Amino acid sequence: MAKTAAPVYDPQAIEPKWRAAWKRAGLFKVSEDAGKPKFYNLVMFPYPSGPLHMGHFRNYVIGDAFARYKLMRGYNVLNPFGWDAFGLPAENAAIKSGIPPRVSTEENIRISKHELDLMGVMYAWDREVTTCNPDYYRWTQWLFLKLLERGLAYKKLASVNWCPKDNTVLANEQIVNGVCWRCGTKPTKKDLDQWFFKITAYADRLLDDLDRLDRWPERVRVMQANWIGRSHGADLEFPLAERPDRITAFTTRPDTVYGATFMVLAPEHPLVAALTTDKQRAEVTAYIEKTRMETEIDRLSTEHEKTGVFTGGYAINPFTNERVPIWIADYVLATYGSGAIMGVPGNDERDLEFAKKFGLPVREIVSTTPQPTGAVTATVLGLEQGYAVNSGPYSGLRSREAFDRIITDAENRRIGRRTTTYRLRDWLISRQRYWGVPIPVVYCPEHGIVPVPEADLPVLLPPDVEFRSDGQNPLLYAKEFVNTTCPRCGKTARRETDTMDTFVDSSWYFLRYSSAQDDHEPFSTEKANYWMPVDQYTGGIEHAILHLLYSRFVTKVLHDAGMVAADEPFTSLFTQGMILRFGRVMSKSAGNGVTPDEMVEKYGADTGRVYELFIGPPELDAEWNDRGVDGVARFLHRVWRLVVGEEDNGPSTGTPVSSAGLLRKLHETIDKVSRDVEAFHFNTAMAALMELSNAMQDYIQAGGRRDETWDGVARDLARLLAPFAPHLAEELWQRMGQEGLVAMTPWPTVDPGLLRRETVTIVVQVDGKLRDRLEMASGISEAEARDQALKSPNVRRALDSKEPARAIFVPDRLINLVSR
């Protein structure tokens, strides 16, 4: 009788079946359950700008695999998804094509949902949020009103960063490497009435609470700390030599005031016009105009050439009584400290560079000893490193002591005060574009700024507007939108035409997921308190400052308002690296993308998923390699052949495996994969599964039987594969006669007794070169291992029968005999 051929692994046939089964079972449909530990797993939601590619899927596969793993570990897993759907690309596309942003956005969402489904990435779709839908942005407007009510939203005239291509304002954080973060255009400066959120009111808490975020990457915490930029120091007052006014200069080193040989003001400082002499006025005016075209990022860059202009005015150093010249320079910002600094070239590299360029005096002011050394170049010493020298009565003091005494004396003389300043600026949220959340205020001739009542929310975007080729905000010309009545007096009023920065939309979306269908409040406090904080948040490092800082701020505001118990939104943060292909980041515009449809058609979704996890440490960038994809496909096909019972003629690794050895290898794999997944070491978890499949193949090739032990190993292999290659795992589980979905079965448990080996294979080297592999007792001592190694014929030949000079021993792993 002819032998019946074993079924062939056909991922394109089996994968749709299991996606349908997960949907029927409501895999991630959950409610609040006090009987289970909760786990809130979240990936950063995307902007739906177009079809997804496999570079995008690194984030989504990691999140899906981790959610599936936690589900099998017995957690009540919330794994939602949504769309950060407002933003400039859709509006810019509308200007070019005439297709309304909502139409293109909804089509992109439809395509992306299909692609996510194709790759087996499952979410709690009953909790889906889309930020451009009125049922969501109604509550973003509510959030604005809440901040306005609490004194944390305000409007003022400000010199802002302006993108001339996108015709809108950019927050400082949205200028990356000196250009607009979206379109790459160099911004200019412009004076506009703008809305701000007072994030600076939370600066200390945002900085201090970083210490609590011990499961965040260190570099993200450092980036946020540097952006907040808290500096302790003093405001010192320098009288003007020819006027009754004083200049207040903030300094972090008041102990160096005796070395202040000049002053520098920001070009925008209000006293510049008054103290500039007629002789210097034209040059000062020209410099101010030039500076207005620069961004703060450019002005603060260490690579930016130091420039400046002498005003002709002088101030009096309040401690030395010396006249010091007053300059203006672009490296001093009006928005930092007092907009004025005392120039101390003897202990500041930036001031030294400026002084050398313009021939200003340099004085030794800090030394490594209590006595001056005579050095006239900058020796930048910290407060805990040096001594004050050439500093009058403070000479010889430790810098820290001089710091405190000078501040005390300045306060007693009423010429200064201890103070703290920050690099952080209030969050500018106004955007002069259509496709965003309308700011819910109106302007009444009688009552001024009037908030729209909560009962009247949402303020809807008008659907029919004209997208102008000059990029001007269409809302300015939408008369039915602009013309309204005052909610307070009923008289004719004008509606605000600015929309909110899209980072406002994403600053609270994780709270909305707790009760996404609620039409009475932004989120249920009870449900938010069950789910929050997010246990695992996964996304790109590019959001380290913008989104993550804003989300922390909004969460703290809502905590203070009594709406949520958590005051930090994300307990654990993982930032994944990018996928490159042909040396460039994978993208549609670069022409190096691999689409999910291409992947599934050729290999199946599970191959793409496992490859994304195996490609390298997930926190690092990785180069896509088509041969690597082929290798993963071969691994999954081998697993199929092993489990369904087809004879596998693949090559053995050369190490026969016994039944007991196979069982031990299984439990070693369960232990390693569990630990690796918890640590987000997905690449090594995949390697461990490949090693287990190799051991299974070696067992069969050595004549091992497909008995009860084998069946147990095969079942546990399916469970171990379930988070990563879920379609294949389900098919194998069913073919082994198991009930239900493997995705909803418990994660396999480790038998600690099987992890303890009676014998181990120890690598034996001579002078670093492999000479043998020997089975030895587990826990063998160095002396015993040395003796056994010396009995090996290969080792004796390599040593020429001589005694080794010494040995290098790694317990249970390696012994290296060194001949000399």
Image: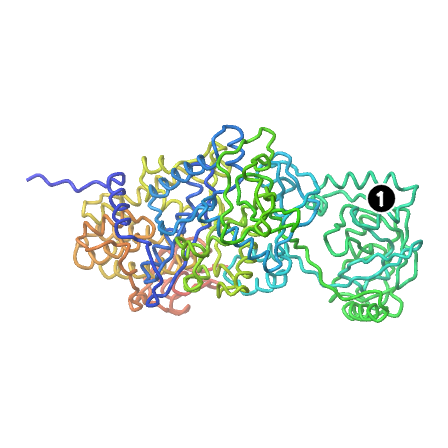
Return the x and y of residue 216 as percentages of the image width and height: 51, 59
Q: Quadrant of residue 239?
A: bottom right
Asked if residue 117 lies left or right of residue 188, the reply is left
How many labels, in total? 1
Q: Quadrant of the N terminus?
A: top left
Residue density around tag 1, few if under 14, some if 14–19, many if 20 or more, within 10 Å? many
At mark 1, the secondary structure is strand
Residue at point 84% right, 50% down? 271
In the rendered structure, which amino acid carries the disc numbered 1?
Val
Return the x and y of residue 673 as percentages of the image width and height: 36, 57
Badge 1 is on which residue?
Answer: 309
Q: Is residue 803 visible?
A: no
Return the x and y of residue 555 as percentages of the image width and height: 52, 59
Q: Is residue 509 above or below residue 32?
A: above
Nearest the camera: 300 or 131?
Answer: 131
Q: Is residue 633 visible?
A: yes
Q: Quadrant of residue 742?
A: bottom left
Return the x and y of residue 306 as percentages of the image width and height: 78, 44
